[in-house]
Image (spheres, helix red, strand yellow):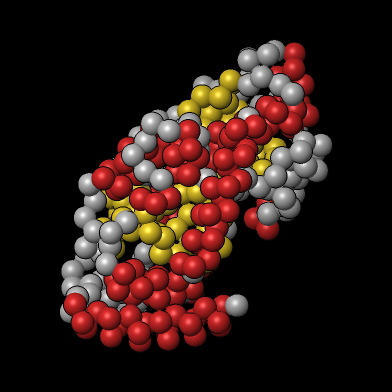
């Protein structure tokens, strides 16, 4: 599969290069910017800086990519800006998080939907996990559910915002365990939500595996369960929610990748779609992601289009049910 992606990318690069010559010169001719809808230090920001680190290489975009953080309201601030104000000249990229922006568009009150953006490529798939402080009395999800059963609405736990993967995981846990929880969205995103757990401001939290992996390595949290269909290679000792008796699927897994605003020239989209996946394949990028406990899941533009459509259908049904 990796060899196929690389070969197809080379062929597409040649075709895209011809398209560039017809109307866009030697695109890109100046540095690019990628908007991240979450704050510095969180999983999306951390990973975005790694996957773009080789953008200036001769075999990549040959121009650097700078990261711009537009955090707030669980990603809504950044994605609203990206959908309504970002330039469509190919120099303004955006990081997407799915299910986040799709779930938010289904719930309403935002200026974007899947039709507002054009995907380029996907770099990762980061499951949600349930975390507690290292000194917490909770040592399993059974402990968490028992407390929530005895104290309806008294189990406070943090997440990165409303109708992001963390919130969807929380809603699924409430339904599967038959309990009432007190989900507290953190305006500082995943990094802020993790700090709230470590500082004892909440009893627990739902966070990204990659953030939790680094926090556990530092000895500040325990990870009690993974919201996915199978255990993750980074946390082979942590059982899934299903293993612990809770019927929770992988709907909250956080897919991350690169997109551009709708209306961007198709020739530019094709050029980016040919090159960006090969940047993710770079050995330096992959080793840095592995060192940071960040699971990679590379998908081409066509594969992301299909994934977005599937998630739209799944989330419409899930959110209507919840």
Left or right: 176, with 56 as reference point: right
Of residues 19 and 60, the one drawn nearer to the viewer in this rendering = 19
Name above or below for residue 16 compared with residue 290. below
Left or right: 176, with 212 as reference point: right
Q: Is residue 277 visible?
A: yes
Q: Residue at x 58, y 34 (%)?
A: 319
Of residues 208 and 273, the one drawn nearer to the viewer in this rendering = 273
Q: On the image, which quarter does residue 241 sit in?
A: top right
Q: Residue at x 58, y 47 (%)?
A: 313
The x and y percentages for residue 147 are 73, 19
Q: Residue at x 71, y 21 (%)?
A: 179
Name above or below for residue 88 compared with residue 157. below
The x and y percentages for residue 310 are 58, 53
Of residues 143 and 103, the one drawn nearer to the viewer in this rendering = 103
Left or right: 17, with 30 as reference point: right
Q: Residue at x 24, y 51 (%)?
A: 86
The x and y percentages for residue 305 are 49, 61
- Looking at the rendered image, the quarter that the N terminus falls into is bottom right
The x and y percentages for residue 177 are 75, 28
In the rendered picture of this protein, how many numbered marks are placed on residues? 0
Left or right: 134, with 229 as reference point: left
């Amino acid at each position: 599969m990796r060899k196929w992606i690389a070969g197809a990318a080379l062929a597409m690069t040649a075709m895209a290069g011809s398209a560039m010559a017809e109307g866009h010169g030697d695109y890109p001719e100046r540095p690019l910017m990628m908007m991240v809808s979450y704050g510095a230090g969180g999983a999306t920001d951390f990973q975005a800086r790694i996957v773009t680190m080789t953008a200036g290489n001769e075999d990549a975009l040959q121009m650097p990519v700078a990261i711009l953080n537009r955090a707030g309201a669980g990603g809504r601030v950044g994605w609203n800006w990206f959908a309504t104000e970002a330039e469509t000249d190919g120099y303004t990229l955006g990081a997407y998080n799915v299910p986040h922006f799709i779930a938010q568009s289904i719930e309403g009150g935002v200026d974007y939907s899947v039709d507002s953006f054009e995907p380029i490529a996907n770099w990762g798939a980061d499951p949600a996990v349930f975390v507690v402080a290292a000194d917490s009395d909770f040592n399993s999800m059974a402990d968490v559910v028992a407390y929530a059963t005895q104290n309806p609405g008294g189990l406070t736990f943090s997440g990165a915002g409303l109708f992001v993967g963390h919130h969807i995981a929380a809603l699924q846990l409430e339904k599967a365990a038959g309990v009432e929880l007190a989900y507290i969205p953190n305006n500082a995103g995943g990094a802020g939500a993790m700090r709230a757990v470590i500082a004892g401001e909440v009893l627990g939290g739902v966070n990204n595996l990659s953030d939790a992996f680094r926090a556990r390595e530092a000895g500040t949290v325990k990870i009690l369960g993974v919201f996915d269909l199978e255990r993750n290679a980074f946390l082979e000792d942590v059982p899934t929610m299903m293993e612990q008796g809770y019927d929770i699927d992988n709907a909250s897994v956080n897919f991350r990748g690169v997109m551009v605003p709708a209306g961007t020239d198709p020739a530019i989209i094709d050029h980016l779609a040919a090159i960006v996946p090969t940047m993710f394949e770079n050995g330096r990028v992959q080793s840095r992601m592995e060192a940071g406990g960040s699971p990679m899941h590379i998908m081409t533009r066509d594969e992301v289009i299909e994934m977005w459509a599937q998630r739209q259908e799944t989330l419409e049904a899930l959110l209507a049910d919840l």
